[in-house]
């Protein structure tokens, strides 16, 4: 069955009956894109903001914990200083002299410095202990420097024992308060550590939830975008490919929303307009082809018919028999020319039904060319690679015979015509090369047109018929030539059977 051939013209818009109001299409797709990206961005920004706030909080807590480490050390030093102060009091009482008085003074000063340094780090609810420590240590110092040293100077053992008991009783509350201050500072640091851990955990949770939310929203947005945009665009692209292939009945229908809905409707209206224009173009082309064909037939038949009529008017039945026989032979030749033109025209116009077989090309080309022998003193060489091609041998032989015959007719004597067959991955190429006058570059595009010929006595349909046969096989025929350098006609045939076995 013949395949339709389409002629295309540039599309320059719609007429008044098919105008499209595209000035202000709905913006639903743009709104969805903005909303989707905006929502994802909002979640991402909110998550980042929360994480930054938590990082800042944790950083502040860590900085505070570094300061509290120093406060803990000072609290421990204060507790140690209070005990060292008591130890040097006890040594003074036990040894009964003032040898430890200088050491006592050093630790007494350390107690005062320790109270001053730890004061900013003590929680408000524990600051009363600073007052108690300061009061108790001052009371100890006053007693030690007063009655205790007097007892040491007198070497009054009973008084020394009594002083030791009193100092020990006064030191116990100071020890307890100093230890309580150290624990209070440690407790503050522990609380900061708990807060930092809690903030870190909250940051991890917030980051994870934010990441999951962004991914989930992205997937949701992608799926909605696929349904709202990608699927309609895929349908539009498929319909556009069908229209590009000549299926002007392809329609998209009302798909998508907003801009895409307007686009799909515009596409359908465009396809309808193209179908109408294509129908007009096909009709115009058909009429032009009929006119061209009729003009060619009239031109080709006019010469032999004119000759026949001229001889018929001048023939004399009673004239010289030899002259009459010569005139009748001329009439027969001109009638045969008319018949050949009619046969070539039928071969060109008739739908081409192929009977495909697996043809071994090397043997086929050698047997086909063998029919010419040594024609007009022009030698014919065949150099073909073996390969099988699905083809109609009768039709394909007609192509080869026509190309070789044309090459012989344009080749001078003592020249050679070469027939070369080469096998490719997906095709088999047959080249017919001659050493004739060649073909001008301007004529390359016209030699396959019906009735185009520069050879006297030719119908101009041979190469057109060859092209139709080759196309019916799913192949191509082309020419390479320069004027004065001979010509190469190349036929490429697929090594697999074509989808259709007929052509026009």
Image (cartoon, helix red, strand yellow):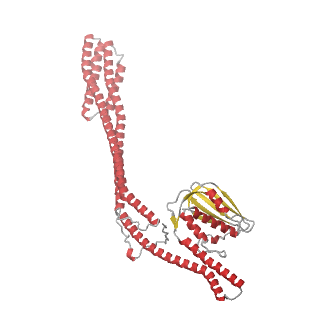
Query: Does residue 445 appear anywhere in the picture?
Result: no
Q: Position of residue 143 (x, y in %)?
A: 27, 20
Q: Is residue 141 left or right of residue 371?
A: left
Q: Is residue 52 left or right of residue 455?
A: left
Query: Does residue 269 appear anywhere in the picture?
Result: yes
Q: Observer-nearest residue: 22 or 243?
A: 243
Q: Position of residue 292 (x, y in %)?
A: 55, 78
Q: Position of residue 434 (x, y in %)?
A: 69, 65
For the point 51% across and 62% down, the residue is 501
Please say if 429 is above or below 52: below
Choose top left, top right, bottom left or bottom right for residue 228: bottom left
Q: Is residue 20 left or right of residue 467?
A: left
For the point 31% across and 23% down, the residue is 82
Q: Position of residue 211 (x, y in %)?
A: 36, 46
Q: Observer-nearest residue: 132 or 353?
A: 353
Choose top left, top right, bottom left or bottom right for residue 72: top left
Q: Observer-nearest residue: 135 or 295?
A: 295
């Amino acid at each position: 069955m013949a395949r339709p051939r389409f002629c295309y013209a540039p599309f320059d818009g719609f007429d008044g009956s098919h105008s499209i109001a595209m000035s202000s299409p709905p913006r639903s797709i743009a709104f969805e894109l903005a909303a989707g990206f905006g929502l994802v961005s909002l979640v991402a920004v909110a998550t980042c903001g929360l994480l930054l706030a938590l990082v800042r909080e944790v950083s502040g807590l860590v900085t505070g914990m570094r300061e509290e480490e120093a406060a803990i050390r000072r609290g421990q030093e204060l507790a140690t200083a209070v005990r060292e102060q008591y130890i040097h009091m006890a040594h003074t009482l036990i040894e009964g002299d003032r040898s430890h008085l200088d050491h006592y003074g050093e630790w007494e000063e350390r107690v005062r410095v320790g109270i001053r340094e730890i004061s900013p780090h003590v929680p408000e609810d524990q600051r009363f202990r600073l007052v108690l420590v300061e009061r108790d240590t001052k009371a100890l110092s006053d007693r030690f420097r007063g009655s205790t040293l007097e007892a040491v100077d007198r070497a009054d053992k009973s008084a020394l024992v009594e002083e030791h008991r009193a100092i020990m009783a006064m030191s116990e509350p100071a020890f307890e308060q100093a230890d309580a201050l150290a624990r209070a500072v440690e407790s503050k640091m522990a609380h900061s550590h708990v807060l930092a851990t809690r903030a870190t955990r909250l940051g991890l949770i917030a980051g994870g939830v934010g990441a999951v939310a962004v991914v989930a929203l992205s997937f949701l947005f992608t799926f909605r975008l696929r349904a709202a945009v990608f699927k309609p665009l895929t349908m539009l692209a498929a319909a556009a490919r069908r229209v590009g292939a000549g299926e002007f009945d392809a329609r998209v229908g009302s798909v998508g929303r907003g801009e895409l809905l307007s686009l799909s409707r515009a596409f359908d209206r465009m396809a309808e307009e193209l179908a109408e224009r294509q129908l007009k173009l096909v009709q115009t082309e058909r009429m032009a082809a009929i006119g061209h064909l009729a003009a060619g037939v009239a031109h080709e038949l006019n010469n032999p018919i004119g000759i026949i009529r001229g001889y018929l008017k001048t023939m004399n039945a009673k004239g010289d028999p030899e002259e009459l026989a010569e005139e009748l032979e001329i009439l027969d030749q001109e009638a045969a020319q008319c018949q050949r033109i009619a046969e070539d025209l039928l071969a060109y116009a008739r739908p081409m039904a192929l009977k495909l077989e697996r043809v071994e090309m090397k043997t086929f080309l050698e047997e086909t060319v063998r029919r010419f022998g040594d024609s007009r003193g022009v030698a014919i060489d065949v150099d073909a690679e073996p390969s099988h091609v699905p083809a109609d041998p009768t039709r394909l032989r007609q192509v080869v015979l026509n190309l070789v015959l044309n090459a012989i007719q344009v080749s001078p004597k003592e020249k050679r015509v070469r027939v070369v067959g080469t096998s490719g991955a997906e095709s088999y190429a047959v080249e017919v090369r001659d050493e004739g006058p060649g073909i001008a570059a301007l004529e390359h595009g016209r030699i396959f047109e019906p009735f185009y010929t520069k050879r006297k006595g030719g119908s101009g349909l041979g190469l057109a018929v060859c092209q139709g046969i080759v196309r019916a096989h799913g192949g191509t025929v082309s020419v390479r030539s320069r004027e004065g350098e001979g010509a190469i006609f190349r036929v490429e045939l697929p090594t697999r059977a074509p989808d259709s076995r007929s052509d026009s």
